[in-house]
Amino acid sequence: MSAAVKTVDYVNVGLYTVLAVAAFIQWRRGRGRPALWAALAFGAIGVVVLAGLLPGSAEVEAVVKVELGLLVLFPFLLYKFTTAFERAERGLERFVGVMTVVLVAWSFLLPDIPQEDEAWSTGFVVYIVAFLFHWTVLSIIAAVRLWRAGRGQPSVAQRRMRFLAAACAFLTAALLLAGLGQGDETALSLVVGLLATLGGIGFILGVAPPLFLRLLWRRPDVARTQEAIAGLMRAETPDEVTSGVLPGMLSIVGARAVELRDAAGQIVGSYRTQESRDDEDVEVLDLKLPEGSLSVWTSRHAPFFGDEEIATLRTVGALTELALDRARLFSQEQAARQALEEADELKHNFVALAAHELRTPVAVIHGVIETMDRHADDLAEQQRADLDDMLRTQAANLKQLVEQLLDLSRLDAHAVKIAPTRIPVRERVSEVIALSAGQRAGEVEVEVAEDLEAVVDPQAFDRILSNLVTNALRYGRAPIRVSAERENGTLQVAVEDRGEGVPSEFVPRLFERFSRTDPSRRRVGGTGLGLAIAHSYAEAHAGELRYRQAMPHGARFEVVLPSTA
């Protein structure tokens, strides 16, 4: 039996020495304040175990007092290890600190320490009771805090914390049994040693578990990570990328929220659980990525227990950036393809519509010329006059249509140069109305201040206004009202009539080329290009043209052009 006790003692020396060295190495690697408390705690217990093997150490009172002092410090340092992640209440902190200081001082002030075959004095019994109470209370607090903190953590972190909690329980049981146990001393020593062995194994698995165990524990997390990466490969849009991978990122480190930012610091995706990110127990990890950053709201335990998981998270974040770039390129390619298809369709429609619109005046002109050429001698004077009027009208229509088509082609090719110049607005409006309205100029009212000036491109202004006035005279009813004012660095011009207005279902197509409602197509002429030209000129001038229903009825077109005057 004694040989078994010695064997267990040597095993414990090895275990706790390895534990102390592992904790020290972790601290030296810059693992922060928790690693420092762990190194101090396990260094203290390692010194106690090693000192127990020194020949005659149990008979040297100073050595025994140092061992007792270190044993008192061990549960306190372990408790401080847990508070590095989650601060305890101030009252508990004060009580624990005072109790530890008192007990350490008491350990060095003991008048005598009985040997194995000596009876214990009353004072020493009281000390032992206080010692066991101190150790038990602090160990239970540390174990409960570690076990509770493991909830919701990734597999590796959860197991490490729970092994530490279990090790606290085993070591506490060993100490209680050694201090209070009775019976066969050899058997008691063996049980105490075995409990200490279990505690040492638990501490090692919690502080520095072997690689093969970490890989085994991490298998569920690896499966989730692989699933998240597979989702990246399937995603075709940035939204699919972020919505597919961000929830999986949370499970990698047991986080509560995550935000992915681009190189400019703009958030490109975020996800959060129901728990608040403002919880004081949350640790914010800012991980630098090749083209941005990743912010993770996780527990304070994650940096210590989940360093490999954090590295995995950084890798997934980098892959997410690549997937976002791929998704953006794919979306841009799709958008470019769609734009090309729409442009091609628009071109074909435009050519077909232009050919259709040109056919009518050309056919009429050809017909009139043929009639006049073949039947000139048979035509009466009035017939000749009617044909002559028809020829002039259709020639004018043809000229207008060609000019409008040329306007559109220049606008499409961005060949229209915008050269803003200071103009007197009222005078310019009156000139445009006189030219575009002709004999119907009296139906147009001008409400523009005499002294109003603006810096705009005269040609673009004339084209926009003339098309709006012509449109109002053709499809609306008098009075036509033209107003203008300068506001917030822009010139705002409105052309309003008192007609029936534009049907609501037709408004989305109002500025499309050759677009006219069926009633207007049957009732009046026109090409359906005027509003499209006005709209394109407004955009070329970095402005906008918009439609509103006039009150109580009618159509109101508002053009807004940037103007510095």
Image (tube, grey):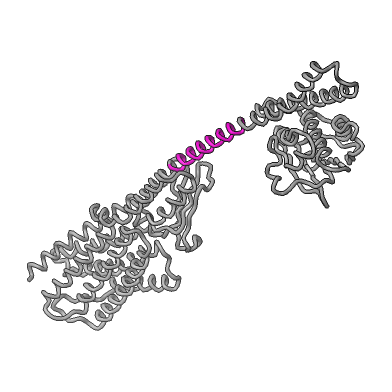
**Image quadrant where residue 113 sits:** bottom left
The image quarter containing residue 390 is: top right
Residue at (28%, 81%) from the top-left corner? Answer: 126
Q: Where's residue 519, x and y in %?
A: 76, 43
Q: Which residue is at the front of the view, 64 or 249?
A: 249
Q: Residue at x 50, y 36 (%)?
A: 333
Q: Residue at x 35, y 58 (%)?
A: 154
> Which quarter of the rendering shows the N terminus?
bottom left
Q: Closest to the observer: 387 or 359?
A: 387
Judge whether residue 337 is colored magenta: yes
Name which residue lies at 73% across and 24% down. 363
Write down the region rendered in magenta: 323-347
Tell whether position 278 is magenta. no
Q: Residue furthest front?
A: 378
Tally of numbered discs? 0
Q: Is residue 489 visible?
A: no
Please say if 383 is above or below 110. Answer: above
Kindly report the secondary structure that dominates the magenta region of the rendered protein: helix
Q: Position of residue 332 (x, y in %)?
A: 52, 37
Residue 287 in percent (x, y) is at 43, 48
